[in-house]
Image (cartoon, grey):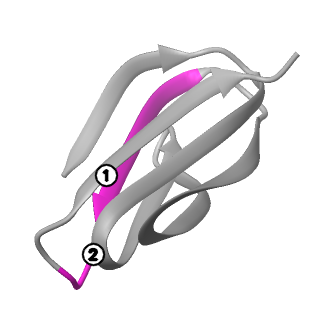
Amino acid sequence: MSKEVPSIAAGTYTLTVACDGGGKAFFDVSVSGKQLTEAGAACNGSRETARIKIAAAGPLSISASSVDAPLIYAYQLVPTP
């Protein structure tokens, strides 16, 4: 599954990811087609965080994947003050 945003401002962001259902989920974050990070979360309900530095504004894409299914997952990307 992939979610796209037409434009995100440059800056520092915090990505928080979580999933449930056993196994592990992976979240790939890219801006303007350039991969910034890949974060993973063990699917036991715990949260994982990663700081992301976006150097220039551009279209954002976050994709989620897993080899284990079914999974329930969530992510949040927020500016870091």
Residue 78 in the image: x percent, y percent?
63, 23
Task: Point out the stretch of residues depicted in magenta.
Answer: 58-68
Left or right relative to 40: residue 44:
left
Nearest the eye: 65 or 23: 23
Would you call the spot at circle 1 few (<14 residues within 10 Å), some (14-19), or many (20 or more)?
A: some
Q: Which residue is mark 1?
A: 73
Which amino acid type is shown beneath numbered disc 1? Tyr
Magenta: main secondary structure: strand
Q: Which secondary structure, mark 1? A: strand
Left or right relative to 50: residue 7:
left
Q: Quadrant of residue 20?
A: bottom left
In the depicted structure, whether residue 65 falls above or below residue 36: below
Which amino acid type is shown beneath numbered disc 2? Ser
In the depicted structure, whether residue 11 falls above or below residue 46: above
Residue 26 in the image: x percent, y percent?
42, 68
Left or right relative to 39: residue 72:
left
Which quadrant holds the C terminus?
top right
Q: Which residue is mark 2?
A: 66
Residue 58 in the image: x percent, y percent?
54, 24
Are the two marked residues, 2 and 1, in contact with CB atoms closer than 8 angstroms?
Answer: yes
Identity of the residue drawn at 78% across and 33% down: 55
Q: Which residue is at the far left?
A: 70
